[in-house]
Amino acid sequence: MEDLHGMYRRLLGPELAEMLTRHPVVGLLGPRQVGKTTLALAVGESRPSIYLDLESPSDLAKLAEPELFLRRHEDKLVILDEIQRVPGLFQVLRGLVDQGRRSGKGNGRFLVLGSAGIDLLQQSSESLAGRIAYTELPPLLLEETGAKTADTLWLRGGFPSSFTASDDAASLEWRRNFVRTYLERDIPQLGPRIPAETLRRLWIMLAHDQGGMVNAARLAAALGVSGQTVGRYIDLLCDLLLVRRLTPWASSAGKRMVKSPKVYVRDSGLVHALLGIATLDDLLAHPVAGMSWEGWVIENLIAAAPAGTEAFCYRTSAGAEIDLVLELRPGKRWAFECKRSLTPTPARGFHEGCKDLKPDRKLVIYPGTESYPLGQDVECVPLMEAVGVLRSLL
């Protein structure tokens, strides 16, 4: 499963290469240290290319006159890393793309990498509208590391340096440093001053409440800030692709829906680092184990789903509840329940939710190795099999 770079082969690689054949600019988004640069360089090996790290003073100096420099390399794929550091480049890229189209040099001109999703989207939305396509690189997936690595991947998370660390202690140290760097260096560079300690405490609280419904008033009271501020901080963590807000399904007529989203720290390894969980034994004994595993499963399922799939949770005040609903296309939906048990039994709320939504497939994901029916058209399926079926829909 490993390539010559010593990293696990990323499933996004072929898709990224294919996108470059259809678009003049492709934006690859993902948190820092998730493997964007390694993947971009691997894609660049198949064609003439040039790589510029916009955090490097020497590379930045090359772009003192960006239009002149980039025109000299119009026959190459230009990879621009951390492009949100130089927002003025987007306007330059627009001009070069438009000139290239007129002269017959169309797609595959620029591959831009960014770790701050919202900045990249806002800065390019107007200047590169119609010229750029985005894709997201998640942390390592179980498909990429193999079924035998499931417990290690769940414990350490999917950031490559964390997953491949020499032991659990080294992995935990890496993740703690990652959190500290984000809080002390990366987030302060995004604009408005955000107290690092307040954001750290919120991040820890979200890890404790992994997969829970957001209660902004309770979080605000604990942090000594307003509910609006809590919402803004969670928005920021979502925009940085570190937290997922799972929107509630809201289309069941006559049902009293719970309208609060569920919130997950997206990387399971960061959940465990924020809570000080060092080993698998510690994790299995911790109250967060079940919800941590649920969040990890959900991230793998969403990553495997076809492009355009929408993800929801489902809960009514009457007790119906589905962990994950994937709307694969309008009118075609699958319902998932996550059970970290070798003898899983779907909750009554799952059956009630399925009566409401009438999904095409009802799956219980569990940590076993064999699939079998559970009755009422519910299938008990290992995670690897579920993501394989979703991936085949592509």
Image: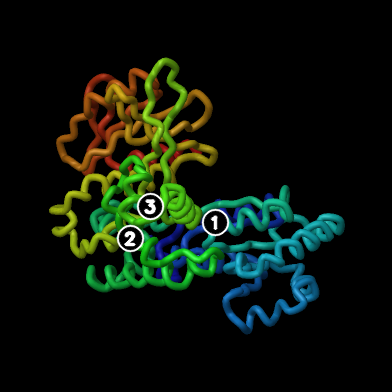
Instruction: Give the image location of residue 180, x and y in percent.
Output: 37, 70
Asked if the residue at tag 2 contacts the one at tag 1, i.e. Cβ–Cβ closer than 8 Å, the answer is: no
Q: Amino acid at mark 3?
A: Arg
* Position of residue 37 in the picture relative to residue 247 (left or right): right
Q: Amino acid at mark 1?
A: Gly
Instruction: Give the image location of residue 30, x and y in percent.
Output: 49, 58
Identify the residue shown where x is 39% and y is 57%: 140
* Disc on res. 117: 1
* Disc on the earlier residue, 3 or 1: 1
Q: How is the image coloured?
A: rainbow
Secondary structure under the numbered disc 1 in the rendered image: helix
Residue tagged 2: 201
Residue tagged 3: 266
Instruction: Give the image location of residue 279, x and y in percent.
Output: 18, 63
Identify the residue shown where x is 79% and y is 71%: 67
Identify the residue shown where x is 30% and y is 25%: 320
Q: Amino acid at mark 2?
A: Arg
Asked if the residue at tag 2 contacts the one at tag 3, i.e. Cβ–Cβ closer than 8 Å, the answer is: no
* Position of residue 263 in the picture relative to residue 169 (left or right): right
Front-lying residue, 322 or 7: 322
